[in-house]
Image: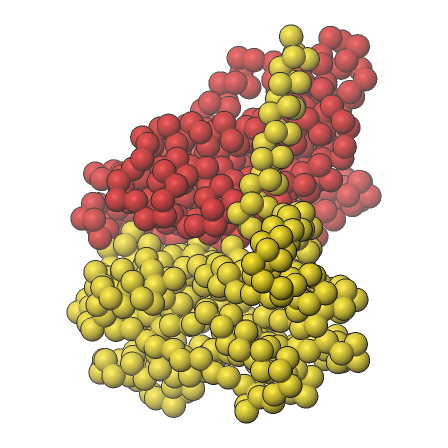
Chain colours: A yellow, B red
């Protein structure tokens, strides 16, 4: 009897794991968060190749054999990290398909060392292009030199790194410092008598954290009426942000601004405010600021529960595609660093159209 | 040697020997530090939250509230540790899986539903089943295939968060019903956090189970000597398996609280590193991580010690990414104090000090 129960359980767990793998491949979600290439997807991709080749040979003569595809290795952060990353990953996956002439492999990790290992793997695989969104700004020099020696062209997207610009072809980035400046400028425009700010930072050392913290730190240093009540990293984590704000509330320290470096952390902070009965939003006690323009966050703005949300444009794939096309046709790029257009939304002026258009 | 001195000594010995001694000492130590630094730490005030309900607030309430998940996990982790002599490092990832399953049922697969797709109780039961399946998977590997617990649970530790993301198609749904948020905050009219009641319920259940069943005895027997317990008619495989399933259930309850706190979860960061805290809670409770005898209450107390420490560090404005370093110090102190050589030395020292005192008197 016991054995029967055990065998049934075993069978069901195995079935579950199988379903998990199969589904993962179908939906093109990464099977593992670590820096492993998506082997599970390869069979599916092969099938697709066959389909497309048969179709295309039937209609026209352009061969879609794998030799003509541009091989790209894409190193990104874990798409589950945030809504921003999910949108970014979906955008890349939609662009770098066989139908668009690419043979793309993806590797995901939130850790720099795992990303570097993945990069070395791609270089050994002799990819044509290495697309990189680095977890950390430091430590990339040697692996990029290896790439250069192997003739792999490197394009940075979303995040910059501390390396010699000659090591990469182009970098398509959000200007995080400018995002921070826009937000701080907006905050200064609110004309409060005194700014007592809870500053909730992202993972320390990331470009987003540095850029978004920089402008605020400068302003706090420059103005006597701007004070940081606390400055803590919540590592993009809503729960941690909630605890940090809770701690300030428990201490009884007055504050009137929450400057969170992403929407998740702002949400956690707001949960702590709600529990303590502190009002927030347009015309209320506490100003809430977030980043990334998640759809739900913009809806909070629309409902005037939050005050400001800075955009961080996740749609870089078309920019990258353009660059690769230019380089493949032998052209040169007019500029190395391409900065994407970004906006900041104010709860008083945001419209439903903005939510639909810019929400991710 | 007078009789009273003898009594004193044995009382002292009993006190130090009691498993609850270390966690209680730690709490007292933290309490004294906070008392000296700022007596306001212990102030509890009655206010109203933004929904207009009366709520208690203050550092002590915060500790009770945020320590809940850890307290619940400590229950299951203690049993797993005692039975298998190893730890489950996948609890954080299984919280993500159970929480994601709960969201999927509540939101019916859409990311922004306007109303609940299923009653909360159904979602919770589904999460319980999912949590128990994950526990059963781990338990199977450990009990039947004799894989080391840490290695066996490494599988879900690595894959769990991706499975959680897959369950909801990588969407991050938000539960629309404010009633769902009660589990992680306050029920209208009751100023005590709901999580406190949930933990209390879990403690009552496990206390009843330990009192009226042989679970505790069998678990200890299996942990101390598997062969001997088998010869005495206990099925070690089943006991180990069961301990992991119970942990799975604890995980589901913790997931309910976690999801309820923000009405949504983020698969990659929810309950991050909570497994290490849960193991630390068991260790703080003075339980041998190699299995065998255990004291459930010491573990639960250990969980609150950790939250007490975390809250204290936040109060002192310690950088939150440095918290782990402070916890590491606690671990080092614990390990050193529980090492046999140090214990022997302490015993000898106590012997030396005791007669010296008498002479003075």
Up-down relation of residue A248 to residue B15 (above or below): below
User: What is the total number of numbered labels drawn onto the structure image?
Assistant: 0
Up-down relation of residue B54 to residue B221 (above or below): below
Is A351 displayed left or right of B239 in the figure?
left
Residue closer to the observer: A55 or B322: A55
Q: Determine which quarter of the picture holds residue B143.
A: top right
The location of residue B214, given as percent across then percent down, is 61, 13
Q: Residue at x 58, y 82 (%)?
A: A326
Is B237 displayed left or right of A327 in the figure?
right
The location of residue A32, given as percent across then percent down, is 63, 50
Is A115 displayed left or right of A192 in the figure?
right
Q: Residue at x 26, y 44 (%)?
A: B114
Residue closer to the observer: B142 or B300: B142
Q: Residue at x 77, y 43 (%)?
A: B339
The location of residue A29, given as percent across then percent down, is 55, 50
The location of residue B63, given as percent across then percent down, is 43, 48
Image quarter where the N terminus of chain B lies is top right
The reply to whether residue B299 is visible in this rendering is: no
Up-down relation of residue A55 to residue A190 (above or below): above
Q: Residue at x 25, y 83 (%)?
A: A189
Image quarter where the C terminus of chain B lies is top right
The reply to whether residue B146 is visible in this rendering is: yes
Is B225 displayed left or right of B132 in the figure?
right
């Amino acid at each position: 009897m016991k054995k029967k129960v055990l065998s049934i359980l075993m069978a069901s767990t195995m079935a579950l794991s199988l379903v998990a793998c199969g589904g993962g491949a179908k939906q093109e979600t990464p099977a593992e968060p670590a820096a492993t290439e998506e082997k599970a997807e390869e069979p599916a991709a092969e099938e697709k190749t066959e389909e497309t080749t048969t179709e295309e040979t039937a209609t026209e003569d352009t061969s879609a054999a794998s030799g003509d595809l541009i091989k790209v290795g894409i190193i990104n952060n874990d798409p589950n990290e945030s809504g921003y990353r999910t949108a970014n990953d979906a955008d890349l996956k939609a662009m770098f398909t066989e139908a668009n002439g690419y043979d793309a492999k993806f590797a995901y990790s939130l850790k720099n060392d795992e990303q570097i290992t993945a990069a070395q793997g791609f270089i050994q695989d002799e990819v044509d292009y290495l697309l990189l969104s680095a977890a950390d700004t430091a430590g990339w020099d040697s692996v990029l030199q290896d790439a250069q020696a192997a003739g792999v062209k490197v394009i940075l997207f979303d995040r910059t790194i501390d390396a010699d610009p000659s090591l990469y072809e182009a970098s398509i980035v959000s200007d995080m410092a400018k995002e921070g400046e826009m937000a701080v400028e907006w905050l200064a425009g609110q004309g409060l008598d005194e700014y007592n700010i809870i500053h909730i930072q992202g993972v320390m050392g990331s470009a987003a954290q540095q850029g978004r913290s920089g402008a605020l730190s400068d302003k706090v240093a420059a103005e006597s009426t701007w004070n940081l009540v606390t400055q803590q990293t919540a590592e993009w984590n809503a729960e941690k942000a909630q605890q940090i704000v809770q701690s300030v509330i428990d201490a009884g320290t007055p504050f009137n601004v929450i400057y969170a470096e992403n929407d998740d952390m702002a949400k956690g902070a707001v949960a702590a405010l709600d529990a303590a009965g502190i009002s927030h939003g347009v015309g209320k006690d506490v100003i809430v600021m977030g980043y990334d323009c998640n759809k739900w966050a913009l809806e909070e703005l629309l409902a005037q529960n939050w005050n400001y949300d800075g955009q961080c444009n996740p749609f870089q794939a078309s920019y990258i595609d353009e660059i690769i096309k230019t380089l493949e046709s032998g052209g040169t790029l007019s500029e190395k660093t391409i900065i994407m257009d970004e906006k900041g939304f104010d709860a008083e002026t945001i419209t439903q159209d903005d939510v639909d258009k810019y929400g991710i | 040697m007078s009789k009273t001195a003898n009594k004193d000594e044995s009382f002292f010995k009993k006190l130090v020997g009691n498993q609850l001694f270390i966690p209680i000492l730690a709490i007292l130590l933290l309490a004294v530090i906070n008392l000296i630094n700022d007596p306001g730490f212990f102030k509890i005030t009655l206010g109203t939250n933004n929904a207009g309900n009366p709520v208690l607030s203050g550092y002590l309430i915060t500790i009770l509230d945020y320590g809940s998940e850890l307290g619940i996990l400590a229950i299951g982790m203690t049993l797993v540790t005692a039975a298998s002599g190893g730890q489950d490092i996948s609890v954080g990832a299984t919280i993500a899986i159970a929480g994601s399953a709960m969201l999927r049922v509540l939101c019916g697969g859409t990311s922004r539903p306007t109303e609940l797709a299923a009653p909360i109780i159904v979602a919770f039961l589904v999460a319980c089943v999912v949590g128990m399946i994950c526990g059963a998977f781990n338990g199977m590997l450990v009990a039947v295939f004799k894989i080391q617990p840490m290695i066996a649970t490494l599988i879900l530790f690595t894959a769990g968060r991706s499975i959680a993301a897959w369950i909801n198609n990588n969407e991050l749904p938000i539960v629309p019903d404010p009633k769902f948020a009660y589990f992680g905050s306050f029920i209208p009219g009751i100023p005590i956090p709901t999580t406190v009641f949930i933990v209390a319920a879990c403690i009552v259940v496990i206390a009843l189970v330990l009192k009226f069943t042989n679970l505790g005895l069998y678990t200890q027997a299996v942990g101390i000597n598997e062969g001997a317990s088998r010869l005495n008619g206990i099925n070690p495989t089943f006991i180990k398996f069961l301990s992991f399933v119970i942990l799975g259930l604890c995980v589901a309850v913790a997931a309910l609280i976690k999801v309820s706190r923000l009405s949504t979860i983020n698969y990659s960061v929810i309950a991050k590193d909570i497994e290490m805290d849960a193991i630390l809670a068991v260790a703080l409770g003075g339980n041998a991580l190699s299995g065998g005898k255990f004291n459930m209450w010491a573990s639960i107390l250990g969980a609150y010690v950790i939250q007490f420490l975390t809250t204290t560090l936040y109060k002192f404005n310690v950088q939150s990414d440095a918290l782990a370093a402070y916890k590491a110090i606690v671990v080092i102190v614990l390990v050193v104090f529980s090492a046999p050589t140090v214990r022997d030395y302490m015993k000898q020292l106590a012997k030396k000090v005791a007669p010296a005192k008498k002479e003075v008197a």
